[in-house]
Amino acid sequence: MVEGSMTQGAGQGPEVRTATLRDFRVPAYVHDVPANVQEHGHDPAPPAPAAPPRAEPDPAYQEPSLSQPSYAEPTSQEPAFDQPEGYTPTQRDLPVINRGDTVQVQIDTEPAPRPTDGLGPLYVVGDVHGYLDELIAALYEQGLIDAEGNWSAGTARLWFLGDFTDRGPDGIGVIDLVMRLSAEAAAAGGYCKALMGNHELLLLGAKRFGDTPVNSGAGTATFQAAWLLNGGQKSDMDRLQDVHLQWMSRLDAIELEDDHLLMHSDTTAYLDYGDSIEAVNDTVRETLTRNDADECWDLFRKFTKRFAFRDESGPEAVRELLDAYGGARVVHGHSPIPYLLGEVGTEDAADGSEDSRPLIEGPHVYAGGLAIAMDGGVTMAGKLLVQQLPMDS
């Protein structure tokens, strides 16, 4: 293992498994999956509120009022809980998949040779959400790591678009891998960096503020309750260390690479935090440094907004961001491509059959070609996407 500086995450991670097998999810859309289902040998998460009747997802969905103060002590006296606008609880539309429900397929792809001098190719990674095995397989397929899980891409540049934890079985393992690859890539003349996702803000808030009530504007809310409702894993919280908290709190929110404006969420809320990339990143870090629960909640709430680029006004919204921060295209995660395409949540897509699984082959280019969506929906039996930029289309 290689140790490096804390900035953009170097450090030591667990031994990485040999990525010779790729897990492909077997049907997924089970709306009555219990919240305490065991995954990957970890302790089950605490009981979650019962799922509402199956229905088509609503971007403005508000979860019924509820709260849980801790993992082991759910209370029957549940205060009102305000779910952030546009957010979707795990058990409603993003079920956690049993780790046993997989089909193993042999990977035959050999890593492609990488340049050793000069500026290397640019890659981006969509939302990982704790699916470490899938991440290792996807990075290996692109030749970014070798069969032992070590950086093998020379001077290549790799950006993660955020959301490393929650919903999947090994969020801390994902963070440890990204931190280690950051050090190894830097030693090879390339780099591996990461952006702040809303789930990083959620995990930081749950750890720092727990059940402290926050001013949500429409009722009582807590980071702890929001984290549990949206796929928080007890095993991640148990393994969370200061090195992980420091790494997450220093992540950038937005960056420009090769005329691509990289961000986590498909929202224009970044404009609320500054008129330049540097200003946005400084404001987000300063907000986290002040450690004010209400300020951090407002930041989290804004980062949960989605679908700003999807409808007829989408191209205009993208141009507003590009005019402010530069670039020719926005590249984002956050909103699963099946959501953007309207393929998830209907009665037809919820029966759990092979035919109902979202068929995601790659990123989704939309908003008149100005936006690229990178969340393939790995939490809903989709695909964890790793893409080289620029794209042809």
Image: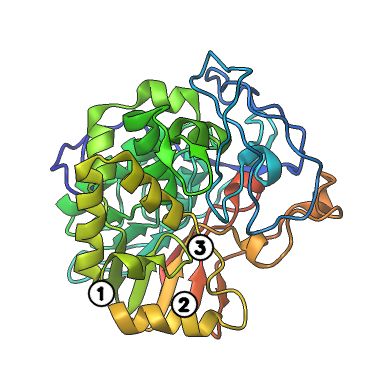
- Depth-wise, is mark 3 or mark 1 nearer the camera? 1
Q: Which mark is residue 34?
A: none
SS for callout 1: loop
185 relative to 179, above or below? below
In this rendering, does residue 153 appear at all? Answer: yes
Q: CA distance from mark 2 to mark 1?
A: 27 Å
Hey, which quadrant is residue 230 in on the image?
top right
In this rendering, does residue 15 appear at all? Answer: no
| Amino acid tagged 3 | Met
383 relative to 327, above or below? above
**Marks 3,2: beta carbons within 8 A:** no
Say which of 91 and 377 sits in front: 91
| Amino acid tagged 1 | Asp
Q: Which mark is residue 374?
A: 3
**Marks 2,1: beta carbons within 8 A:** no
Q: Within 10 Å of the Cα at label 1, are there few (<14), some (14-19), or many (20+) other Cα atoms?
A: some
Q: Residue at horizontal 65%, vertical 24%?
A: 37
**Residue receiving disc 1:** 275
Q: Residue at horizontal 47%, vertical 56%?
A: 126
Q: CA distance from mark 3 to mark 2?
A: 12 Å
Disc with the residue nearer the chain's start (3 vs 1) = 1
**Residue receiving disc 2:** 391
Hey, which quadrant is residue 63 in on the image?
top right
Residue 329 placement (x, y as % from top left): 41, 79
| Amino acid tagged 2 | Met
**Marks 3,1: beta carbons within 8 A:** no
Q: Within 10 Å of the Cα at label 2, are there few (<14), some (14-19), or many (20+) other Cα atoms?
A: few
The quarter of the image holding the N terminus is top left
SS for callout 3: loop
Q: CA distance from mark 3 to mark 1?
A: 25 Å
